[in-house]
Image (cartoon, rainbow, N blue to C red):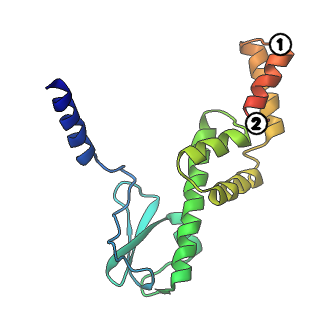
Amino acid sequence: LLTQTRSSVMSHRRSTRRRSPTAEPRPARDAPTSGTITRIVAQKHNPNRVSVYLDGEFAFGVGLDAAANARLDTGQTLSVDQVNELKVADEIGRATEAALRLLASRPRSVREIITRLRQKGFEQVTIDRAIERLEGWNYVDDAEFARFWVENRVAHKPRGRRLLEQELRTKGV
């Protein structure tokens, strides 16, 4: 009886689980993949994203940077290729933002960032483009990370040379 109750509670929790506050409206199964932009609305829970409506129906959400770079405006007509390009640019932006959140707490190696972005469900092509951006901004540098890691370990948790080398190898440096 206890297991039946527990399983029914768990299935109830799954069915009533709330969506992430940053989640955008779900596109209809037959959401338009091209058309004329009728509305561009700031998203309720994430002001750094906008919802794009094509021919009166929600089509997709995109970051403000991607929307600004594409110079989206109401009345503009988007082809299927343009919509796909916007979605790819948005995905790269989201991966970059996720990587920046990781880097906010401490420097990380490229491999650490790749691993964490994979865990978050980003595709390898998207991850590679996000890493290129971060390297271009000098936010990621394995040699600098190794220096930071060794200095930090020597100051706070002294370790031998071999153990430090092993730790750096596990971090992908």
Residue drawn at x 54%, y 72% is 86
- Residue 65 placement (x, y as % from top left): 56, 65
Query: Looking at the picture, does residue 160 appear above or below residue 56?
Result: above
Query: Looking at the picture, does residue 150 appear above or below residue 43?
Result: above
The residue where tag 1 is placed is 160
Considering the numbered disc 2 on the image, is that residue within a helix, a strand or a loop? loop
Q: Amino acid at mark 2?
A: Gly
Q: Nearer the viewer, residue 37 or 129?
A: 129
Mark 2 Cα-neighbour bin, 10 Å: few <14, some 14–19, many ≥20: some
Residue drawn at x 60%, y 40% is 102
Q: Would you identify the image quadrant in which residue 5 lies? A: top left
- Please give left or right for residue 26 compared with residue 91 in the image: left
Disc nearer the start of the sequence (2/1): 1
Mark 1 Cα-neighbour bin, 10 Å: few <14, some 14–19, many ≥20: few
Q: Amino acid at mark 1?
A: Gly
- Residue 20 placement (x, y as % from top left): 36, 49
**Which residue reaches farthest left?**
1
Residue drawn at x 82%, y 24% is 165
The residue where tag 2 is placed is 172
